[in-house]
Amino acid sequence: MEHLPQVRLIARRIHERLPESVNLDELISAGTIGLISAIDRFDPSLNVKLKTYAEYKIRGSILDSLRGLDWRRGSSASGPSRSKPRFRPPSSAIELLARRRSPRSSDFAWRSTTSGLSRSVD
């Protein structure tokens, strides 16, 4: 296949910006799947070069594969890792507010207007 060097080039460029735990060979494999998809779906009547179309499919396939990675371990995961919560659940935030002071309507009174966001005055 004459387009395999293109897969390697795109995979290497993406790999340069990723943590070392991400395997380049996995990116190349994902890119190869994107190339196969591009060849299968290519329509020459649209006046687009296969190389141009394949580039988008290759890059998209690699990025799709990266979305499934657990970044801390560098391997595929079924979902995001749960070692540390990203934010407090709403009930905890409400309890914290209740201990400090009662919330005022101005704390929550943001509304959308035609000119953007503005604060309502009570």
Image (spheres, rainbow, N blue to C red):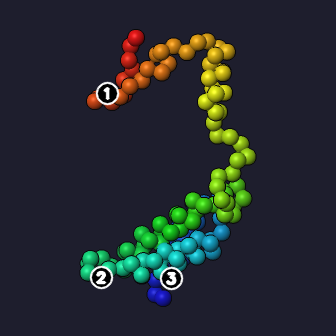
**How many discs mark residues in the rendered view?**
3
Confirm whether residue 14 shows in the render. Answer: no
- Numbered disc 3: secondary structure: helix
Give the Cα separation between the discs numbered 2 and 3: 20 Å
Q: Is residue 52 above or below residue 18?
A: below
- Judging by the rendered image, the residue that carries numbered circle 1 is 113
In the picture, measured across the screen, residue 109 lies left or right of residue 78, that is: left
Horizontal and vertical percent position of residue 24: 62, 71
Q: Are marks 3 and 1 in contact (CB under 8 Å)?
A: no
Mark 1: few/some/many CA within 10 Å (<14, 14-19, 20+): few
Mark 2: few/some/many CA within 10 Å (<14, 14-19, 20+): few
Kind of residue at badge 2: Pro
Q: Are marks 1 and 2 in contact (CB under 8 Å)?
A: no
Q: Is residue 53 above or below residue 66?
A: below
Which numbered disc, 3 or 1, marks the residue that appears first in the sequence?
3
- Numbered disc 1: secondary structure: strand
Confirm whether residue 96 shows in the render. Answer: yes
The label number, if any, that marks residue 14 in the structure image: none
Kind of residue at badge 3: Leu
Which of discs 2 and 3 lies nearer the camera? The answer is 2
- Judging by the rendered image, the residue that carries numbered circle 3 is 4
Residue at 52%, 74% (x, y): give it: 31
Residue at 26%, 81% (x, y): give it: 45
Which numbered disc, 2 or 3, marks the residue that appears first in the sequence?
3
Q: Are marks 2 and 3 in contact (CB under 8 Å)?
A: no
- Judging by the rendered image, the residue that carries numbered circle 2 is 44
Which residue appears farthest toward the front when viewing the image?
A: 91
Horizontal and vertical percent position of residue 96: 66, 21
Give the Cα separation between the discs numbered 1 and 2: 47 Å
Residue at 33%, 30% (x, y): give it: 116
Horizontal and vertical percent position of residue 37: 45, 77
Horizontal and vertical percent position of residue 90: 61, 30
